[in-house]
Image (spheres, grey):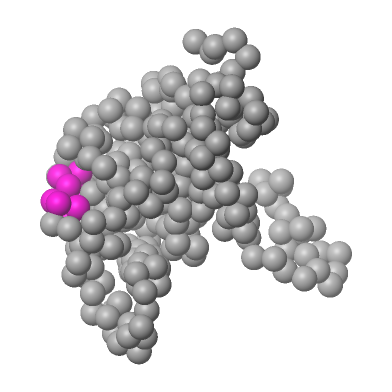
Amino acid sequence: MRDQGGPPPLTLDCDLTEEWLVGFLREEMARRGFGKAVIGISGGVDSAVSASLAVEALGRENVIGVRLPYRTSSQESLDHAQLVIDALGIESRTVDISPAVDGYLANEPDADGARRGNVMARMRMIALFDLSARYRALPIGTGNKTERLFGYFTWHADDSPPVNPIGDLYKTQVWQLARHLGVPDVVVNKAPTADLIVGQTDEGDLGISYARADEILNGMLHGFTHEALRARGYSEEELTIVSRRLNGTHWKRRPPSVALLSQSGIGESYLRPVDY
């Protein structure tokens, strides 16, 4: 129930959400002429939910799960990814990206952890899109709304798949839907991590829990000021963390900026009806 004067609650109607997202996937796949999907399975809850929805929409025989480990990836992530693949009964591939990543980074020995992580994330998308061509299977996205608003993803990597069923679900809502869909508890309950750097966790990187971040983001996106949110119990430090990330990453959520020289600029003037 919505509290007096507050933003809409983050509690999902999971049956309705499941029905809507399964229908969304079927429609978007058909629009693009694809009957199969390929998904990078990380061992985390986001990819597990996207894969579960794809299986319901397309059938398990039409979904391919791909594990994309680097040599420093945790064995736990690999095991949890396989657990999801086995639970869904989908075809799987394991592609070790270490030779490709190391081959490039041999020319950049001074690359720091952030650069190395970005190379890994983009190499995973190279593999995923190549397998898309091999299987004629559309890549499905796995980025949640919190990550997208925070810019907590590698540009032209995690955000690259053309269809994303969970991109408008906050992380805490993804957890709700995961439990509803029967994602294994060990996957739902573990600390989220991009698994690009040993010991890395999402909440450690962000400096705030997903539970607090989602409530603040939900308030901000519905027009609540810092003053109003402070009155609701959020600290100035929390509000600063969230607003800095939100306001500093708009460029990651936009297509490339193109200088317009005509009256038929692609994405500005030239749009199909479904693009409006």
Residue 82 falls inside the magenta stretch: yes
31 vs 14, left or right, is right
67 vs 168, left or right, is left
In this rendered view, identify the residue nearer to me: 196 or 16: 196
Residue span colored magenta: 76-84
In the image, is residue 227 above or below residue 129?
Answer: above
Q: Main secondary structure of the magenta part?
A: helix
The residue sitting at 30% across, 45% down in the picture is 192
In this rendered view, identify the residue nearer to me: 70 or 196: 196
In this rendered view, identify the residue nearer to me: 162 or 209: 209
Residue 96 falls inside the magenta stretch: no
Look at the image and tell me whether residue 138 can be seen.
Answer: no
The residue sitting at 33% across, 32% down in the picture is 175
Give residue 117's quadrant in the image. Answer: bottom left
Q: Looking at the picture, how far across and down is residue 108, in whole percent? A: 36, 85
Q: Looking at the picture, how far across and down is residue 183, in whole percent? A: 24, 34
In the image, is residue 3 above or below residue 17?
Answer: above
In the image, is residue 101 above or below residue 273?
Answer: below
The residue sitting at 47% across, 42% down in the picture is 146
Please, which residue is most extreme toward the right here? 263
The residue sitting at 54% across, 13% down in the picture is 2
